[in-house]
Structures are given as structure tokens and as C-alpha cells.
Amino acid sequence: MECRLPFSLVVFCLVILSSTVRSELVISSVEKFVDLHSHIVRVVSFLKVENQGPYDVSEFVLAFPDAQAKNLATMLVIYLEEGKIIYSEFPINSTKPKLKQSNMTFYPVTLPKKLEKGKTAGLDVYVVLTNLLKPLPKEITQAESQLLVYTDNIYYTSPYHIRNQSIVFRLPGRIESYSEYSEMRLVESELRYGPFEEQPPFSYSPVVVHFENNNSFAVASNFVQEIEISHWGNVQVTEQYTIIHGGAHLKNGFSRIDYQANPSMSGASSFRTLVARLPPMSHSVYYRDEIGNISTSHLRGDSQGTQLEMELRFPMFGGWKISFSIGYSLPLHDFLFESDAGNNVLNITFGSSIEEIVVENQIVRVVLPQGSKDISVKSRFTTKKSQELKYSHLDIVGRPVVVLEKDNVVPEHKRYFQVYIYYKFNNIFLLGKAMMLILGIFLLFLICILYMHADLALSKTSSWEEETEGRK
Amino acid sequence: MATSKVEGSSSLRHAFGGVLSVFILLLIGVVAFSIRLFSVIKYESVIHEFDPYFNYRVTQFLSKNGIYDFWNWFDDRTWYPLGRVIGGTVYPGLTLTAGTMWKLANSLNIPLSVETVCVFTAPIFSAFAAWATYLLTKEVKGPGAGITAAAILAMVPSYISRSVAGSYDNEAVAIFALIFTFYLYIKTLNTGSLFYATLNSLAYFYMVCSWGGYTFIINLIPMHVLLCIVTGRYSSRLYIAYAPLVVLGTLLAALVPVVGFNAVMTSEHFGSFLVFIIIHVVALVYYIKGILTPRLFKVATTLVLTVGIAVCAVVVAILVALVASSPTKGWSGRSLSLLDPTYASKYIPIIASVSEHQPPTWPSYFMDINVLAFLVPAGIVACFLPLSDASSFAVLYLVTSVYFSGVMVRLMLVLAPAACIMSGIALSEAFGVLTRSMKFHITKYFECSHTEAPAKLGESTSTESSAPLENMTKSDTTEKPEVARKEKVARRKQKKEKELTENAHVKPVSAKKEKRPLVLPLEASIVSVFLLIVLGGLYVLHCVWAAAEAYSAPSIVLTSHSHDGLHVFDDFREAYAWLRHNTEVDDKVASWWDYGYQTTAMANRTVIVDNNTWNNTHIATVGTAMSSPEKAAWEIFNSLDVKYVLVVFGGLVGYPSDDINKFLWMVRIGGGVFPHIKEADYLKDGQYRVDAQATHTMLNCLMYKLSYYRFVETDGKGFDRVRRYEIGKKHFKLTHFEEVFTTHHWMVRIYKLKPQKNRIRGKSRKSKLGSKSTSSKSGGMTHKNPWN
């Protein structure tokens, strides 16, 4: 609310600036759904775009206020023409925001097919945002529920004129308070504003929802995944997490008696378990931290996948931190394929195996076998890439490690994004270490035999000893 | 034993026996290693107990920062605000060993974590210790006894209790070092080789690096030397075995920072120097005796004696005066409590408060050395038949270690190798006698059933090939000492044998005299062998049971079996993990000293006192705080910058070694330094109790309050499952502390010191109230005014 004045000023400038360029497109209707069930905000907007100008249009611009653009984890755009999915793409990481004004970020979307004049097309924009839910009050006691505030523009932020729009908030439970507008309806846990008719570009009016949300607020401030490939048929995955409860901080300490006596009332905002979905056929699973095993976990497996239910060392309250690591082995043939050019193709899924978690910084280290060559990485989104060497298990030249780093990773990354790593590897290297060991043991025996047969004494008889003994 | 039965030509037999011995020793090593893995299999690969956590932390530091930083390491995470110079106060042997192993593995690109190396150091060194025992016993009584002793030591429960995987304590490597030093001493004594003497001082150096128990060596070896001199067994070998050890060993020992000048300054080492002087005098006397005529020698003796005694008296008087002038008579408290078992409980409550410093009970002997307790006397007898330098050493080692084990439970560990050596000798000798008489009967049987010739041939071969076997004295039914002796002698150099004969240590002449040995009846020997095997089997069963059930628990994780399966109590690590992640890095945590090492290692937080109980006053301060009422305790803790107080409480689940049960030591140690804490205030009828009959002081002290805060709400009555009664004061509030964390089973409770309250007094109070109301008003205004 407090930024209303400068914001509208900028909007005003922008309208003048952009109206000449994009006035030919009009959004005939927008329906925006904001899902606030977890700490990840998922926004789906169904747009109908109409070309009213004299020319065909090949580009559509999505606009986000900076506060959202900064926390935009991923975006998916589906282009529909006459109800058919024509095209879907991932613009956020494939094209950098080209236009950037003071507090607005624009993402131009290249349409797969030019939108002819007078025609209408559908655009479904699926946006995943993080860090936008702010706890209010910032500190709660163990007995209180966690209340969150979500602020948004009641109108769809867009550089285009919008004829008809509405916004829907889907909430997990009780609503504490919300902005009052004339066109609004609250049905159970769904809060609907609109429809609003005929709004100019960059219309802005804030809407604030203050609601209860006790879902686990797990944020991994740091997540390092190491995938070690062995051509003997095994993939060893190690995942290290540092997890923070990102919700309202706990005040007045933690009382176990309250927590145990009345679990439903006390510690509603805390979470005790995290669930990791591991790939099918995972085996040799471990779950530990720097001071040893964590003895409380359950592992269930079926053909779809393996589910690891991890009970943390202590229940996580707001602001508390914990770190642990899990590891598992996978059969290699599920992940490694051979390409036409004789390359090995490693297909890995990017993202954390823990459900509903925001990863602030993820590092994936793929350790390829010793002797791999011509390594290239193909991913459908931008990551920081680098290469290093790792020495383990009697390595001599070291194993090449592909390091991928990415900020703000959400479960959607896991669902939609794959990383392909191409490399060449000669299987004869597999025998190298076995031969090395054989040679080593052979040499040991050889040295033993030589030592047993060699006479290292300087003289045959130990004359000095005899002399001294004789003197006695 | 097995080797001696192999038939065939002598050289082939020798080779085969050698290979078989190596193979058996290898298997013994494997047994020693793997019997200690129960803890890893049943629990996990984790460091155990208290002290190992400190060693682990030091090793981590060493592997991260290198050796030079290690020597200069000043640890500001413990003994706040004093800190501790780790590099100068720690026995570095264990950490350097593990650090070297880790570095070696990593330089070969074997990815082992420091923790893994630390966990498996003790089992690896137990295998080494078993091999060292083989060598030592071989020097004493031959390879048969050696292998038996090694096998027994590989699984002796007493040693297992200190060296299971994860028990990363000094003793883990020190026992190996101890046995190996003794082996090298005996080896030097038997060979008179300076090479072994040098090795011996190096082994002694390693022992000094590893464990404070090195004083046992530096007192035992002089005692043995003295014994040899007194019994007229002085020889140049004895001189070579002893003199270099004292000179080189003391020089090397002084290099270890923690020992330093103590190697020449403290009374523990005086014995060795005294014997060093004596052996030189004796050597001189022997030399002079050699160059003088007997009559002249007599004159010289009387002359020297009169002058010498006078000088000695003066020196001794000065020495005694010097030593007596120091308050502890130059002895450290722990050593003094060794000499006088009641010393610690009288004067040093800190030493007395450690359970492993208590004298053992008889059942603990049976638990820790089991059937060895019965075999040891037989072994002693065997050592006297005949008595050699080496076997007299074994006997002396046993006798002294029996005494020490009677003083402190902990030193049972020193007794274990001695008992194993003795039992190994006894078993080996017994088996030797029995199998030989069985063999004799069987040969005789063949003699009767077959023709005369082969029988005679067989007899002659047996007398030839295993001549020592046949030439047995049969004085004792079970003891057959000569065999080993003979075998050893046969393997030694000619001159050695000559010398031995000269010194009349062995009696090969007498052995040769008895052509027909005393032979036991076949049935009796078969039954005896069977019984011995049963005895050995029982021992193995007991050891495996002890390793699996009694000694494998890591003590930071507790388990209990209930009707619905295994229940794990992982409260300690829960609390430490919480501290590690949810407190500031520089926060200070106060707890009783037992948990100091674990807190620094697992929670990485600064502690006030820890298990290295070097500063009694500091510990007494914490003890006083714990036994004071809340306000006084708050003041003490606040003056120490303490932010969190950690107490261990077992009342909910029945964990007996909690802080309430240790409370008497807090009172006692605290009261020892701060007289306003009086033990009598806490006692009711001479007992510590926390039920309704408890004293007022007890029910208001901090420890009581922190332990039982809101405890009554669990079951409504406040029933303590450790003490088995309802607590005295059930409902109370904390004024200066607030609960911040309690673990799942309430075993660890962490409290935070409340911040100091603002001073509210008179006028300032009024204005404060006024400002408060205005602020609330203005707060109301802001809601209305959209511009603010």
C-alpha cells in the first residue's frame, strides 16, 4: 500500500511509453488463480488475447512487478488456438528479460504462430513464486497458528488493455482479514475478486490477504547433490540439505510438555517429517547428519518410486535450522543411454527429492567416471556450469565433475526439467583399477620373495658379536 | 601347538609350520578386528561415550589444520573463559596415529572420512595388540604359547570394553604400545641387541605419546631389572635392555609436550633413575670383580661400602626432604590414588566421582577376564618351570597389574594382557602335555599292533624330530615348560644358548637326564583335552556375548526392547543437533562436566567445563551454581557469560545416570571450594532424595528445578522412574531461566538464562508507565492515520 504513489507514477510513464508499441493487442479476458496452499505461490492465469491492430503480431509481453520477478522460480506458458494446445515453452530461463524499467520486469514471449489481425488466441501462464508469503505477526508462540500475508495487484499486471478480469485466491484455511472490494465473494476457502471490466494497461490496486497457513514451510538454504556414476552399473546419489523453517519465528522457547500433551493445538506451524520421493529401484538408502545416523525414518518402495519418510532430529519451529544428508544407490541402466554418435547420455532430473520444498541454492555435482572425455551439458534452463576434478577410490587422473548451480529451485523444476550430459567413455578403463590392485599385490609378494632370498648382511658371520662374547 | 604336530622333514615342517602360524595369526587379527564390530552392526558407525568425542574433535582439527597448528592449538571452545592449550595438554599418540592413517588413505585417494578412521582405529590396533602379544609370549614361552595368548587376547572382554569400534580412546592404541614395548624389552633381554634396545625406546616413546599409563612401563621395567640384579641374574644383556631405554626413552619422552620436564621431575620417574644408578654400580662392580683378584676385591668392597653408604644416606636424606616439601610429595593425584586406594575419595572428589576410578568388584573380574582368572595361576606355575628373565618379567607384570586393577576399574585393562599371556602359557603347556601323552599312547598302540621295526622307527623319529617334546620333566601334571623353552633355544643362536647354560637359567642337562617322561593315561588326557576345549569354548562364548551385548552400546544412543520391538533413545544427539543449529556460534553452554566433550564436538558450542578436569575451581563453580537457588545460580552463570544451561534428566524414561544421580558430586565438589555449599543441607538421613522428605535446600536448588520443571504435568503425579518415588515439589515456576528445548524423551533439557530485567524503581517506573501509555495511544493513532 505504501508504494502506491510512486508505483502508479511509473505506471503512468510506462503507459505513455508503451502504448504506441503494443496497443494493437487487447486481452479480452483474464482469470487469475492464486494458490496459497503452501509456501510456494502458484499462479495460473488464463488469458484470451485479441489482435485488434492492423498487423500480425508475433510477440506477447508478460509483465511482473519486480517484487514478483525477483522471486519468480519458473514460468510455463501454453499457447492455445481454438482450444488446442499449440505450443508450450519456458520463457523465463530461455529468454532473458529484455525490457526492464524501474520496478517492472517484462518477459517477451515469442508466439509460435503469428497472431493474425482480428483473431483471438489463448495463453495459459503458469507462474511459480517463492518468498512472497510474509508471516504476520513475525513471531508466534508454540500454541499459535501461523498467519501469512500475501499482497498482489487485484488487476492483472499487463501492458495491454484488459476488458474483463477476475482474480481468485485459493486458501488453505481460515482467513484473518482481506481487502474489501465491491466485487468480491468468499466461498469457503476461495476468495474471488471481480469481474472487473475495461481496465487500462498497468492498472493497479493492491489486494492483501491475511490468512492462516500451517503447512510446512521448509526452505532449503543450501542443497548439494552429488551424483557419482560408475560404469560397473551403479549411480550413487548423495544429497546434503540445510533446511530452515521459513515461517513465523518461535518465541518464548519450545515446551515439550505442551507439544506432547496436545499435538493438535500446540506446534501447529511446526513440521516433524519431510518426505523424499526417490527414483524407483533406489537401494542402500541412508539418512544421517554430521553426528551420526538419524534413527527415525521409514522407507516404502513400489514400482512408481521409493518414498523415504524422514523424521527430523527435532520438530522444526519457525526460524529453526537443521542439516542432514541422504544417500541412495540406483541402477545405472535407468539413467544412462547411448546416443547415435557413440556418446553416453546421462539423463538426470534436476531438483530436490523432497516434496514441497524451496531450494534457495542448489548445486548438482555429477561425477563422471575416470577417463571420460568430450563432456557437454544440455539443459532447458540456464544454470551456472563449471567443471572440476575429484579424486576418490584410488583414482590417478581424477574424475571429471560437472557442476551445475541454480538459485530458487521449486518442485516444478523436477517435474519439467531434465539435464542431459553427454560424454565419451571407453569401457576398457573399467579394468584399470582391478589391474592396478593385482599389480600392487603382485609387487608386494615379489618384494617379499626378493627380501627373503636376499642376504643384506654385510658380512656372513656376525664377527663383532662373537668378539664381544668371546672377550667375556 | 598346531604347528608342532606337523610331520615331515624338519625344514619342510618348519616352513609349513611357519606358514600355518602366519595364517593363524592373520585369522587372529581378523577375529580381533571383527569381534569389535558388533557396535557398528548393532548400532552404527559412530564415536562412543565422552572422551572419544574429544579425541575425534582433535583429530578433525589435526586433519584440517595440519600438525604445526595442532601443537599450537589453543582451544577457546572449552573452559570458558580460561580456554585450554590442547597441543600441550593432550597425549598426541592416538590422534597422530589416526591422523596419519587418514592422510595415508587420502593420499592414495581412498575416500575415508576422519570419523570412519577414528571409529576403526581401535579394532585395527587390537589386531596389532594380538600380534604383539604373540611376539611377547613367544619370547617368554615359545610360539605355541604365543599363538594361544594372541588368540585369547584378541577377544578378552576387558580389552574389548575399551576398544570396540567407535571407542576412540587413548587406550585403544596404548595397549598395543604397552605390549609391544614389553616385547621389545624382552627381546632385547633375550638377544642383547642394541638394535632392539633402540626400537624399545622408540616403542616406549610411542607409548608415552599415547597414554598416561606409560608410567606403568617406566616403573615395571626398573622393578624387573632390580629383581634380576637382586636375584643375581645381572648380565650385559640386562644392561643393554635397560640403560638405553632410560636414556633414550627419557629424552624422547621429554619431547612430548604434555610430559616435558615431568619425565625427569616427577616422582613417578624417580624409580627408573635410581635403578639406572644401581645397574651402573652393579656393572662397575662386575667389571672390577673381573679385573681384580678375589682378595683385593673383598677389600675394595668393604672400602666402597662404608664410604658409599654414608654418601647414599646424605643423598637420600636430601631427596626425601625435597620430595616431602611439595604438597603432593611430587606425585600426581591419580598416581597417588594408585598407591593409596583411599587417597582419592579422601582428598580429590573429582577423581573419586569418575566411576571408572572406583575399585572393581569381584563380578567385574569374572565379567572382564572370565576363565582367565582360573588359568592365570597355572600360567604362573608354568613360568617358574624354569624361571628365566623373560618369564620372571611376565610374572612381575601380572602381579603388579593385579594390584593396580584392584585399585581402579579402569586399570583392569592393564591386567588383561598379563592375564592373557599367563593363560596362553598355561593352556599351551597343558595342551602340550596332554597331546604328547596321547601321542605317546597312540604310538605305543601302533607299536603293539604292528611289527617291531616300524614301531621302533616311529619312536626313534619321534625322539629325534621332536626331541624336546619327549624330554619332558613331569613334575607337574599340567605344566610342560621345557618344550617352548627348548624350541626357542633351538631357534636361537649358539652363543645365546651357551650363555643361558652358563647362567644356569635352563636345565637342558636335567631334561636330557629324564629319557622317559611321565605320561598321563590316555583316557585322562583325552578327557582333559576335551574339558580344556570346553573351557576355551565357554570363554569364546562369553567374549562374544560380552562384545555383542555388554560393551557395544555407544552410550549416546540408548535402546530398549519392549513388547512392540526396539525402541531407540536418541535424545543426546537431538539436543546437540538443536544446539548446533539453533543457537549462536559463540553462545556458551553450561552443563556438568560429563557432557563437555560431547557438547564441543557434537554441538560445536563453547562449554564452561569438560571431561578434562584440569581446573577444580571451575568445576566447583558450575557445581555451586547447580546446587544454588535460582537467583544465585543465575548470577554465577551470567558472570560466566553462559546463555544456555543443559541438564540431563532420566526421570521420565528411567535413565539412571542423569544429573540428579550425579548431583552429590556437584554438591561435594562445589562445597569443597565454596564453603557456603554444605553437603548436610542436601541430605536427609544421610541420603540424597528429591521426594517429599527432601530438604528445602534440595528442592530449591537449580538442578532440581531444571530437572523437574513442569514434570508433574506428564502424569499428574510427578513419579520419577529412576528414583522410584514421587518428587517433592511439583508445581513451581522458573524466574530466571526459561525452557527453550527438551528432547523427545526428556533426557536432555536446555534452558536459557532470562535477560536481566530493567530496573524499575520510583520515578523512572512512573515515567516508564507514562511513556508506555502514550506509545500505545500513538499506536492507535497510526492505525487511523494512513500517512504514517
Image: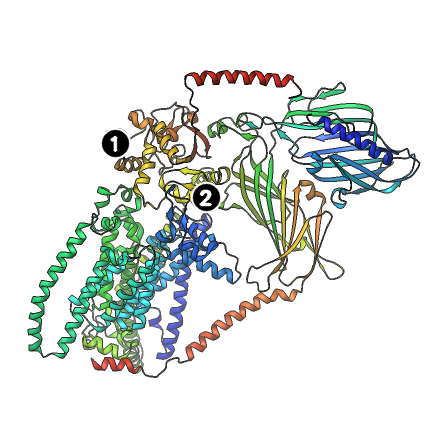
On screen, B229 above or below B336? below
On screen, A296 above or below B306? above
Could you tell me if residue B480 is visible in this image? no
Q: Amino acid at mark 2?
A: Asn
Q: Residue furthest right?
A: A54
Could you tell me if residue A264 is visible in this image? yes
Left or right: where B249 falls relative to B511: right
Q: Which callout, 2 or 1, points at the residue further toward the start of the chain?
A: 2
What is the basis of the colouring in this image? rainbow
SS of the residue under disc 2 = loop
Give the labeled residue for mark 2.
B604
Quarter location, residue A57: top right
Residue at the image position 39 percent from the left and 74 percent from the top: B16
Figure quadrant of the C terminus of chain B: top right
* Coordinates of residue A323 in the picture (x, y in percent): 54, 42
SS of the residue under disc 1 = loop
* Coordinates of residue B190 in the picture (x, y in percent): 26, 71
Q: Amino acid at mark 1?
A: Lys
Give the labeled residue for mark 1.
B678
